[in-house]
Image (spheres, grey):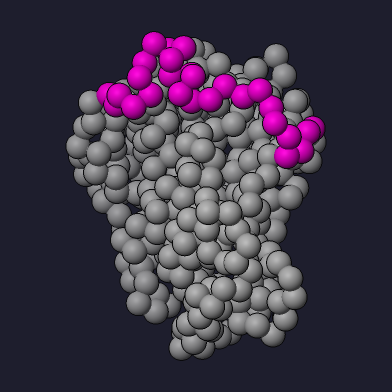
Amino acid sequence: MSSTGDQDTTQPADAARLLGEDAHTSPALSTAATVERSDIESLHRDEAIGDLARPQPTVIMESECVENGDGHGRTYDTFRRGRNTLPNGTEEQGRLNHQHDILMRLMDGNLYLAPLDPINIHNVLDIGTGTGSWAIDFAQRYPSAKVIGSDLTPSTPLLVPPNCSFEIHDAEEDDWSYSTPFDYVHGRLIITCFADPLEIIYKCFDNLKPGGYLEIHDLSPLEFEGDVSRSKPIRRWMDLCIEASTQNGRPWNNAVHFAHWMHEVGFEDVEERLFKLPSNPYEGLSAHQQELGRESMQNLSSAVEALSLRNFTRTLGWTPAGVRELAAAVRRDLSEGVKAYCTARAVWGRKPL
Ligand SMILES: C[S@@+](CC[C@H](N)C(=O)[O-])C[C@H]1O[C@@H](n2cnc3c(N)ncnc32)[C@H](O)[C@@H]1O
């Protein structure tokens, strides 16, 4: 395993050239048909999930976002007894799309870092796809690949390329009965999702072709430069997020184990690359990092509440008003120039031939 190194990766633009395509030329976008959740669930039951030999429904899905008992003004998915602790309403979807743009900038426009051979990438799975931005972009860049975005909670993308489809699939509890193995499985920002990430990595391994790649990108909890007191709201908030997520059995500081877990499962040539993502435009950053910091601050300011409302009220016994007060103090710390950043971690490995 190499760490934070430069590696000879095929960049998407090069890859598109290899395919004889302009990376910026999209296949025709189709407007998503809306399908009721009950239809989707019966699709799940009645047909093997993700049977790539059959045409997939181009899209999905009318969201069953309901503001349930403890929504506190946010909407959450009710699937699996509302296990998902993050909201899924329009505000959160907008935030995820903005975060996708930030991560694309951080990665210099690269959708992946694994040394994929795009000519041989036919079937792709994006687990925990969220709003589907990554899946849609990948499908647009590589029109000959069939891309499935799967998620516990339905997404409602309006424009979907014909080679991209979405499915409701609980990667933890549902059967992974894909009839065709994948060339590439991708998961991004999934640290909050799984009680047993190692088990998910095994499922990815089992559903890849020999020679196929798994790639996971995730963010660390906030880290700080200089002397930031534990009593400062932003640091306290982060400590509480880790405490709540650990109590929930889905700790947010698990990404450091991804590379080791991939080795354990049997992936070879596992590589890891780290990027620094400033959470605000604090003093001492380069112009590029300042720009990323400005975007991140906007995103995190909206995320603070989304990330903690359900977690703190359900798990730590906080009141919604208490969470909102702390969230306001966190936003203040960010705008006053606290030196906070995340480590973005990209890890990938190949299933042996
Ligand atoms: C933070 S979002 C990341 C979305 C997307 N990957 C991105 O990078 O923008 C995490 C997503 O994982 C989904 N998720 C949570 N638990 C899941 C599970 N057990 N199976 C599948 N998806 C899950 C959530 O519904 C949410 O859409």
Q: Vertical placement of 158 versus 234: above or below?
A: above
Q: For the stretch drawn in magenta, what is the main secondary structure?
A: loop
Question: As displayed, is residue 155 above or below residue 146?
Answer: below
Task: Decide if residue 98 is in sight here.
Answer: yes
Instruction: Identify which residue is drawn at 59% across, 43% down.
Output: 217
First to last magenta residue range: 1-27
Between 289 and 161, the one lying in front of the other is 289
Give residue 271's quadrant in the image.
Answer: top right
> Which percent across, then down, holds residue 134?
43, 39
**Residue at 63%, 41% in the rendered image:** 346
Rendered residue at 65%/30% (across/down): 205
Q: How many marks?
A: 0
Q: Position of residue 307 (x, y in %)?
A: 51, 68
Based on the picture, tell me whether residue 59 belongs to the magenta stretch: no
Q: Is residue 174 above or below residue 87?
A: above
Task: Determine the residue positioned at 47% across, 42% down.
Answer: 104
Q: Is residue 46 at least partly visible in the picture?
A: no
Is 14 inside the magenta-drawn segment? yes
How far across and down, in percent of the image, does residue 337 sit? 57, 73
Tell whether 62 sits left or right of 222: left
Is residue 347 left or right of 26 when viewed as pictured? right
Which x, y percent locates residue 56? Answer: 33, 28
Q: Is residue 57 left or right of residue 206?
A: left
320 to 292, vertically: above or below: below
For the N terminus, give its image quadrant: top right
Residue 273, picture quadrant? top right
Left/right of residue 145 with respect to residue 3 in the rendered view: left
Give the quarter of the figure containing the C terminus: top right
- Choose top left, top right, bottom left or bottom right for residue 222: bottom right
